[in-house]
Amino acid sequence: MSPRVPYWRLSGFYLFYFGTLGALIPYWSLYLAARGHGAREIGEVFAVMAATKLVAPNVWGWLGDRSGRRMAIVRLGALGAFLAFCGVFLAGGYGRLLAAVALFSFFWNAVLPQVEATTMNHLGPETHRYASVRLWGSVGFILAVAGLGAVLERTGAGAVPVAVAAMLAGIWLASLAVPEARGAAGGAAAGGLLGLLRRREVAGLLAVCFLAQASHGPYYAFFTLYMEGAGHGRAVIGGLWALGVVAEIGVFLVMHRWLPRYGAVPLLLAALALTAARWVLVAAFPGSLALMAGAQLLHAASFGVYHASAIHLIHAWFRGRHQGRGQALYSSLSFGAGGAAGSYAAGWAWEGAGPAATYLGAAAVALLALGVAWASLGRRRPAAGPAPAGTL
């Protein structure tokens, strides 16, 4: 990797950002349940967190593309997210909690798409090495999951928002060290952003990303509660979350070799097939620790391979002045719209049909994503490096 790339500064940011997710995603449902909220309300809170990504990343992405000062936006978003999240400590009722979470998420969603664009610009012609930077986010996730899981064995769920707030403060401090990067070369596709979105492969990829993340709704909202109900202790559950991210790290270590060798599209197709298999395992064998460990190892595919392949394609197809909005669209349509739809549907399905049926539904959604990907992307094999918009 070129010495011009601020590797450790970028890696430090990812460490804190995904450390925050490691404190939030596995244990937020426990905290909400301890406050007395039921499955439907928990699903709604997760849906609000995801739904803000429909608007917020695109607003911040437009500002980033117009100003060219992506890291200034990141610092503002990180500070705003920390201050807004502190409102959780003051929220007595469900309505106030939901408002605090919505405001926190609006600022929070300013952060990652702009950092992703900054990282890709710093990497320049070495964009296939993105996973080597991103893997430190997975390390942060593991440390947070394992550490907070051990703490929760000895304390109450009230430790969860404290840990999240501390990590958010770390994100803001880390953002101060990351320098701005020059925008990537390459013009926009003919017809501008709308013309780019009309391309079959671009529209297909965004639809696939929506469906892939929708299939994760039951996992992010209810996996911890599901495992508790199956008889696993909180330390074991934390270990399962950590195992999934260890597998993710392993994939990130080799993606810079796999992308040139196999291509992003074949890797994406394989990841979607393995995602469906993962949810079938979780639906059928929640009481088997060995099989749950196997399902967690498939996180290497359902997130690691999927994300590295998808973000590679987004960077290749959204160039020049569309770069920030390309990352924002990826975030808003996948983790935003897809995550919101998946979490909301999971909350209703959990109460109406039960956990096993909910995860089987997630497997069906993953298979639908595979079908869309095959139809719209199946014959394409982009190279490892970036390409001007209008090619590929």
Image (cartoon, rainbow, N blue to C red):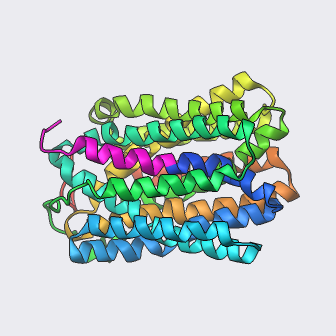
Q: Quadrant of residue 276?
A: top right
Q: Position of residue 181 (x, y in %)?
A: 18, 58
Q: Looking at this view, is 190 or 172 the one in front?
A: 172
Q: Position of residue 319 (x, y in %)?
A: 22, 63
Membership of 13 in magenta stretch: yes
Membership of 62 in magenta stretch: no
Q: How many numbered marks does the figure carry?
A: 0
Left or right relative to 230: residue 77: left
Q: Position of residue 293 (x, y in %)?
A: 65, 27
Residue 198 visible in the shown view: no
> What type of secondary structure mainly makes up the magenta span?
helix
Q: Residue at x 36, y 56 (%)?
A: 173
Does residue 329 lie above or below 258 as drawn? below
Give the residues drawn in magenta, as a range: 1-19
Does residue 5 lie above or below 59 as drawn? above
Residue 244 visible in the shown view: yes
Q: Residue at x 60, y 71 (%)?
A: 87
Q: Looking at this view, is 85 or 364 the one in front?
A: 85
